[in-house]
Image (cartoon, rainbow, N blue to C red):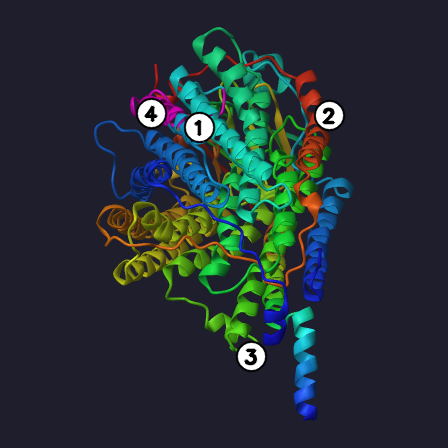
């Protein structure tokens, strides 16, 4: 085998682009907003668990649901979107480069998103928008809340268009080469994001803003919910795919291996593009106004989106096993024991991957049509997405930050920081196991999500739930300690770590890897199929919803304490 | 000598299809976990 | 594109399991009629009394037959209106004998609410303009907490009721 390697054609490492100081400032701007959001959002989460366990009551007339709105908006929308766009820009800058014009356009996207975030945040803090991050009509927030959200989305579109331009320019300069894997993945994620966020943009611009300003008297509630969930499910894949990028194309480098299969990685991303969007009804299974046959059809499509994750699981295990065996670790699981568990750049994402096993299984259960009644809007669901987004995605983003931040600021990840990172990851997993575990159980016992402390008239069930809410407060407190530690590590890495060069790990293919088929980059075909699937899944039920619409709903602002 | 030859052939096969026994077992365990989890919630659904 | 032999086995096993889940769900939904509630019955949210079921005298528990009951509820922030008892006090607790079939019918006058008889499969979204309906057999005796499980405003956690299933 050794001979074979030297004899094979010299493998060409794809050219990479050094990241200049000006570019680094752009990427760091996005990432900084993400970590500030982590701190604020995490603090809100802690307060929620303390209120709900009956430990404290909020001072100064602050409302539980105001805190919950901040928590949801700032973590699910702001932290994720800013980190993802910053990370993706860094990946693109490294693999296909960024021109000065593109960088300026990227700054526009940053400022538009930040201004939007500020407008939305201000309205929430003034108590004019305690509508939670799903802002279900006919609860009505202040118009600026919706306008701010619209700006965040428009800003993210600018980022997506810059990404497309980056790939296009690179492709023109390298017409015979396949686009770098990471650039391909970013392109898929941004295509999905733009197609999906069109739904919520239409809801906000056409329905919510005119209605909240008083230009429209009523709103069609079911249409607004359907548009929201058309966006809401791909939203969770928009969070997940950047984590998959790190797993497929960065982790192999960190563990000293190669990409298992470039083609299969691309194929799984294409499948994610196809099946992430036409599945929104699985969030609306217990709603009265949607035909059950179409609910079931979207359940089938939802199960299709599991397949690329099954492929991913195989690819990752295979990367680990091949790498371990090459290093000489035999036996069935020798490769697993000898993974670089003490390297935080590996450990944090790996723990994230493991959390996705129960997270993914829970997702299949949630989407299971009539079975959804067991868990719908119970604490189980809260437990579920604290595994997926708050563990799988977050730990992977933390894992990326340990090398990306020092790479961008010209510093080094020191052994001390590495050790702190390991402690941080363990705190996170322990805290989350307690919190998410008790949320799952409480949900199966019927405990509702999104609710302040209540004894529900003193029933026995409510007393049972309280025990789990106390466990959530314990888990939440541990997690908040984890957040403080993470913020400390980020500040250290950004400003105080010793100067040096931290590697930007990008994995390569095996020297003798089979070539990736050309059709993988047939963007028109992929977008065409995506649109057809969306039209198939939504046209008939959407027409049905509109044709059988009840009278619309006027705005309600008093229930959120906003008179 | 024969042993060495065998080893060589074995290695050649491996370069075609890497040894992924551990991977297969891992993913099958993962699959079983999903089936058990789904099955238990289905049981709760039917029981209620 | 090359698939490792074990990956083929894995994908057949994995996709096969998903297909099995879908067959089980599809059989239950289409043959046994356990679809999630989806009647599409509409109503004017600003005039729910126009519908018989939600006139004030019809709210709450009604016995329609031996072991057959209907419960009509008008939800609003932050209350489930189940009518009044003999003394004119609002009904907060409903008592049903074990094994009876109960049809829950509920609609909202204002914002979106949830309706979950905790610990049962009666778990529905309640949206303005629609009637949410679900029939169930109350198999196990005990006290069930009815909770609003979709955020409806500052008093959301105070929106509850009780269903007691007696021996």
- Circles 1 and 2 on the same subunit: yes
Dot 4 falls on a residue whose secondary structure is helix
User: Which chain hosts label 2?
Assistant: A
Task: Say few, some or many: other residues with alpha carbon within 10 Å of mark 2 (under 14 / 14 to 19 / 20 or more).
Answer: few
Q: CA distance from mark 2 to mark 4?
A: 39 Å
Residue A236 x/y as whole percent = 52, 40
Task: Say few, some or many: other residues with alpha carbon within 10 Å of mark 1 (under 14 / 14 to 19 / 20 or more).
Answer: few
User: Which chain hosts label 3?
Assistant: A
According to the image, label 2 marks what residue? A540
User: Which chain hosts label 4?
Assistant: A
Q: Earlier in the sequence, mark 1 or mark 2?
A: 1
Q: CA distance from mark 1 to mark 2?
A: 43 Å
Depth check: give the residue in front, A92 or A216. A92
Q: Earlier in the sequence, mark 4 or mark 1?
A: 1
- Circles 1 and 3 on the same subunit: yes
Image disc number at residue A319: none
- Total marks in image: 4
Image disc number at residue A331: 3
Q: Which residues are magenta?
A: A111-137
Task: Say few, some or many: other residues with alpha carbon within 10 Å of mark 3 (under 14 / 14 to 19 / 20 or more).
Answer: few
Query: Is residue A126 in the magenta section?
Result: yes
Depth check: give the residue in front, C119 or A227. A227
Q: Earlier in the sequence, mark 2 or mark 4?
A: 4
In the drawing, does residue C136 fall left or right of residue C165? right
**Residue that appears at 63% across and 72% down:** A4
According to the image, label 1 marks what residue? A101
Q: Earlier in the sequence, mark 2 or mark 3?
A: 3
Identity of the residue furthest to the right in this view: C31
* Residue A123 visible to an observer of this rendering: yes
Q: Earlier in the sequence, mark 1 or mark 3?
A: 1
Image disc number at residue A118: 4
């Amino acid at each position: 085998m050794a001979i074979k390697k030297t004899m094979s054609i010299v493998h060409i490492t794809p050219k990479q682009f050094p990241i200049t100081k000006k570019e680094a400032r752009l990427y760091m701007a996005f990432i900084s907003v993400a970590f500030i959001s982590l701190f604020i959002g995490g603090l809100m989460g802690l307060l929620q668990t303390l209120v709900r366990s009956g430990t404290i009551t909020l001072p100064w007339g602050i409302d539980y649901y105001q805190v919950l709105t901040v928590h949801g908006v700032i973590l699910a929308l702001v932290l994720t979107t800013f980190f993802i766009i910053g990370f993706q820009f860094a990946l693109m800058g490294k693999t296909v480069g960024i021109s000065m014009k593109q960088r300026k356009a990227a700054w526009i996207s940053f400022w538009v998103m930040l201004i939007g975030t500020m407008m939305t945040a201000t309205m929430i803090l003034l108590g004019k928008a305690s509508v939670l991050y799903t802002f279900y009509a006919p609860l009505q927030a202040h118009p600026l809340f919706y306008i701010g959200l619209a700006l965040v989305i428009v800003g993210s579109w600018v980022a997506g268009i810059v990404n497309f331009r980056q790939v296009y320019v690179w492709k023109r300069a390298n017409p015979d080469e396949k686009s770098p894997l990471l650039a391909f993945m970013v392109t898929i994620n941004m295509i999905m994001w733009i197609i999906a966020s069109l739904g919520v943009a239409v809801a906000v611009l056409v329905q919510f803003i005119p209605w909240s300003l008083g230009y429209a008297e009523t709103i069609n509630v079911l249409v607004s919910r359907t548009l929201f969930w058309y966006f809401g499910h791909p939203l969770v894949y928009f969070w997940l795919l950047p984590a998959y990028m790190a797993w497929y194309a960065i982790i192999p480098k960190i563990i000293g291996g190669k990409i298992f299969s470039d083609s299969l990685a691309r194929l799984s991303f294409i499948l994610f593009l196809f099946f992430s969007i036409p599945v929104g009804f699985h969030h609306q299974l217990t709603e009265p106004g949607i035909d059950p046959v179409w609910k079931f059809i979207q359940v089938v499509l939802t199960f299709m989106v599991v397949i690329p994750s099954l492929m991913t699981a195989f690819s990752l295990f295979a990367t680990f096993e091949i790498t371990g065996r090459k290093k000489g670790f035999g036996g069935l699981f020798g490769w697993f024991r000898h993974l670089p568990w003490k390297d935080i750049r590996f450990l944090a994402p790996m723990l994230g991957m493991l959390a996705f096993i129960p997270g993914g299984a829970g997702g299949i259960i949630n989407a299971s049509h009539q079975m959804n009644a067991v868990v719908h809007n119970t604490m189980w669901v809260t437990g579920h997405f604290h595994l997926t987004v708050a563990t799988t995605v977050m730990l992977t983003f933390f894992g990326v930050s340990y090398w990306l931040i020092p790479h961008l600021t010209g510093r080094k990840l020191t052994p001390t920081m590495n050790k702190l990172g390991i402690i941080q990851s363990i705190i996170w997993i322990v805290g989350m196991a307690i919190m998410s575990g008790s949320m799952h159980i409480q949900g199966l016992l019927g405990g509702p999500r999104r609710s302040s402390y209540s004894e529900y008239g003193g029933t026995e069930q409510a007393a049972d739930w309280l025990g789990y809410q106390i466990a959530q407060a314990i888990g939440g407190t541990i997690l908040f300690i984890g957040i403080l530690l993470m913020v400390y590590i980020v500040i250290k890495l950004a400003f105080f770590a010793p100067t040096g060069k931290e590697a930007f790990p990008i994995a390569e293919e095996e020297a003798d890897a089979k070539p990736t088929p050309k059709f993988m980059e047939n963007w028109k075909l992929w977008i065409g199929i995506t649109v057809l699937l969306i039209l198939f899944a939504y046209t008939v039920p959407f027409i049905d919803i509109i044709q059988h619409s009840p009278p619309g709903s006027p705005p309600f602002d008093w229930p959120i304490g906003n008179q | 000598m024969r042993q060495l030859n065998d080893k060589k052939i074995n290695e050649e096969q491996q370069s075609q299809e890497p040894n992924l026994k551990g991977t297969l077992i891992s993913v099958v365990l993962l699959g079983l976990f999903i089936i058990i989890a789904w099955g238990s919630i289905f049981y709760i659904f039917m029981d209620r | 594109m090359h698939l490792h032999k074990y990956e083929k086995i894995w994908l057949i096993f994995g996709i096969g399991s998903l297909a099995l889940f879908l067959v089980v769900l599809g059989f239950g939904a289409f043959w046994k009629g356990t679809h999630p509630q989806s009647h599409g019955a509409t109503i004017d949210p600003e005039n729910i009394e126009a519908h018989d079921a939600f006139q004030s005298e019809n709210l709450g528990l009604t016995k329609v037959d031996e072991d057959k009951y209907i419960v009509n509820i008008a939800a609003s922030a932050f209350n489930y209106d189940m009518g009044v008892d003999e003394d004119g006090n609002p009904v907060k607790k409903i008592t049903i004998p074990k094994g009876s079939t109960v049809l829950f019918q509920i609609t909202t006058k204002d914002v979106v609410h949830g309706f979950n008889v905790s610990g049962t499969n009666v778990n529905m979204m309640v949206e303005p303009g629609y009637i949410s309906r679900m029939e169930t057999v109350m198999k196990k005796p005990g006290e069930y907490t009815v909770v609003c499980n979709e955020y409806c405003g500052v008093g959301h956690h105070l929106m509850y009721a009780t269903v007691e299933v007696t021996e």
